[in-house]
Amino acid sequence: MCGIVGAVSERDVQGILLEGLRRLEYRGYDSAGMAVIGGDHSVQRAREVGKVAALGDAMKANPLAGHLGIAHTRWATHGEPSQINAHPHMSGERLAIVHNGIIENYQELREELRADGFEFTSQTDTEVVAHLIEKNYRALCNLHDSVRAAIARLRGAYALAVVHADEPNHMVVCREGSPLVIGVGIGENFIASDQLALLPVTDRFMFLEEGDIADIKKDGITILDREGQSVEREVTRFEHGADSADKGEYRHFMLKEIYEQPKVIKATMEGRVTKTRVLEQALGTEAANLLENVRHVQIIACGTSYHAGMVARYWIEELAGVACSVEVASEFRYRKHVIQQDTLFLCISQSGETADTLAALRQAKKAGFRAALAICNVPGSSLVRESDLVIMTQAGPEIGVASTKAFTTQLTALLIFTLALARHNGLPEEQEAEIIEALHLVPGQVSDVLALDGEIAEMSKAFMDKNHSLFLGRGSQFPVALEGALKLKEISYIHAEAYPAGELKHGPLALVDSEMPVVTVAPNNDLVEKLKSNLEEVRARGGELFVFADRKADVKAEDGIHVMQIPSVHPITAPIVYTVPLQLLSYHVAVLKGTDVDQPRNLAKSVTVE
Ligand code: M6R
C-alpha cells in the first residue's frame, strides 16, 4: 500500500513525479504529496487530501521547481487521511522522506525522540523515521550513514526515499519488506514502488534486495547491501507495452482488464501446452524433479488469489489425486502447522508483494516444505525472487483494484500446473489431452461471455437499490461464487455473501426474501440437478434468482428466475469461464451506483502492509 516515486534529473522533476503518482494511485489514494529540492537548496513541499488530481490542481497554481524530488500517494494506516498526515514528512526544514510500509516500534521511538526535543506534527509512524534520520544527521553529517543508522533501529516493513537540502544532488533509498525499484535513465535516475510508475521515462529497472540501501544520483547509482558491502543488481527490461497504464477506449481499467481476458489467458498458455499436452519443461528445469514426489500441496494466498487457490484444490485432488489444503496467508502465518512429508508450498499472488503472503512464504522456507512454488503476475516481485519455482501469469499490469484478469490467468496457470502434477500421479494421457483441448477453447468461450455484456448490464439494474445479495455455487463453482461476491462488495459496496448452495438450508436461507437477489452459477456438471433443488428452495421463499447457466443444464426462466445462457464448457474449465459474467455484473452495478470502480473506498491494489 502507498506508492512512492522519486527522480533526480537535469530537467524539472515535478511532471515526472506527478505522472508517477498517477500511475501508482492504485496503491492508495487518501492523500498525495511531493517534496522537491529547489535551486536555492531548500525543500519545497506540497500535500493535498484526496487523489493525485487534487495535488496536480494545487500545483498548477504553485508549481515546485527542482531537479531532485520525492512523492507519495497514501493509503492511511497511522492517522486519518489528512494534509498533516500526508507524505512527504519532514524533520525541520531540510529533510524530507516518503515511506511505504509500517514501523511497528514507532511509539517507543516517538517517546525517545520527543525526549530529545523533536516535535511531531502528524500521527504517522513515518514522521518518527524522519526525525530519527535527522537526529543521526546532526551527528554524522552524511545522509547515507544517517539512513543506515536509523533503519538499524526500525522494526517492521519499509521502503523509504529520503532527501536532504544539504545534499541536493542525490536521494537515499532503502527497502525491507516493501517493494522498491530503481528506474535507470540516461543522465537521470528514478525510484518507485512499482516499475509501472516509471514507464514514461525508462524501461530499464533494478530491483533492490531486502536490506539494500542505494544512493541515487542523476549520473550514478551505488547500492550497498545489509552488511554495507557494495553490490550490483541486475538491470532488466520491462516486458509489457508502455501503454498498460492507459485505459484506452474503455471507461474504466476494470472493464479494459475484463475485456483483455481472452488474450491474456491465451498468453498464459503459450509455450506451456501443445494441443494435447502440458510442456512440463516450460514450468522450469527443476519442475519434473520437484513434482515427482509431491504428496501434498499447501496453497497460501489472499483475497481473489485465495479464491483461485480454492478452485485449484478441486482440480489437484480430482486430477492429480494429491491432497491439497488452502489457507489465507494472514491466518496461516500465525498458527502452528503439522507439515506432512513432501508437501509443496504454493503461493498465489497477482502483485507478488502482498505482505501476508510473503511472510507465509518466508516462514515456510524455514519450516521444512519440499519446495516453494509461486504463481505470480509481476516479474521481479519479492515473491518471484524468493520462490524456488515460478509460473508467471501473463495478465500484464492490472490497475483496477478489483482483480479480474489476474484471477482467470491464475486459474489457467494453476490448471496447467495441476496437469503436470497429475501426470506424475498417473493421469491417463487421454484425460490430459481432453482437458488441454478444453483449455484451448476457453479464450473463445470468454469472448462469447463478453458478448453478453449488454444483457448483463440490463440485469444489473435489479441490484441497484439492493443492500444485500447472496451468491451460490457448488463444487469448484463455490469459489467462483465467493469471487463474484467479493467483486460485488468491493466495488458496489453492496453486502454480498457466497455459500455452497447445499449449505443454504443450514442457515442463510433465513435471509432470503424479495429484497435479497440470489446469483447462481450453474454449469452443466454432475452437481447441476442438486443445484436446481437448491434454487427451488430459494424460489419457494420468494427469493429472486439470477442464474448463469449452461443451456444443457436446462434451468428454465420463470417467475422469479432470470436465466442467462452461458456457452457449454468442460466442467474442469468452467470456473474460468463462469467468473466472467460475475465480473461484468459487479462492474455494471458499480457503474449504476456511481462508485469509484477502479479505486473503491478504503482499498488499495497491493497490500504491502500486514
Ligand atoms: O496481489 P495479490 O494477489 O497477493 O493480492 C491479494 C488480494 O489483496 C487481492 O486479490 C484483493 O482481494 C483484490 N482487491 C480482489 O479484487
Image: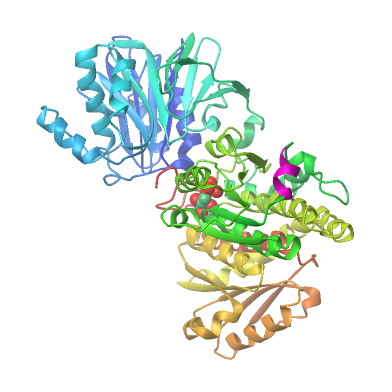
Q: Does 287 lie within the magenta span? A: yes
Number of callouts: 0
Q: Quadrant of residue 28?
A: top left
Residue at point 68%, 41% (across, down): 394
Q: Is residue 247 above or below residue 537?
A: above
Q: Does 18 lie within the magenta span? A: no
Please state if 283 lies on the left or on the right of 139 as rendered.
Answer: right
Q: Give x and y (percent) for residue 117.
A: 10, 27
Q: Is residue 335 above or below residue 413?
A: below
Please state if 449 lies on the left or on the right of 43 as rendered.
Answer: right
Q: Quadrant of residue 551?
A: bottom right
Where the N terminus falls, by quadrant? top left
Query: Depth check: 544 or 318 in front?
Result: 318
Q: Give x and y (percent) for residue 185.
A: 55, 15
Please state if 443 lies on the left or on the right of 392 as rendered.
Answer: right
Stretch of the chain drawn in magenta: 286-292
Asked whether the viewer can see residue 270, the reply is: no
Asked whether the viewer can see residue 94, the reply is: yes
Task: Name the residue furthest bottom.
Answer: 540
Q: Give x and y (percent) for residue 19.
A: 48, 29
Residue at point 80%, 65% (across, down): 570
| Dominant secondary structure of the residues highlighted in magenta in the image | helix
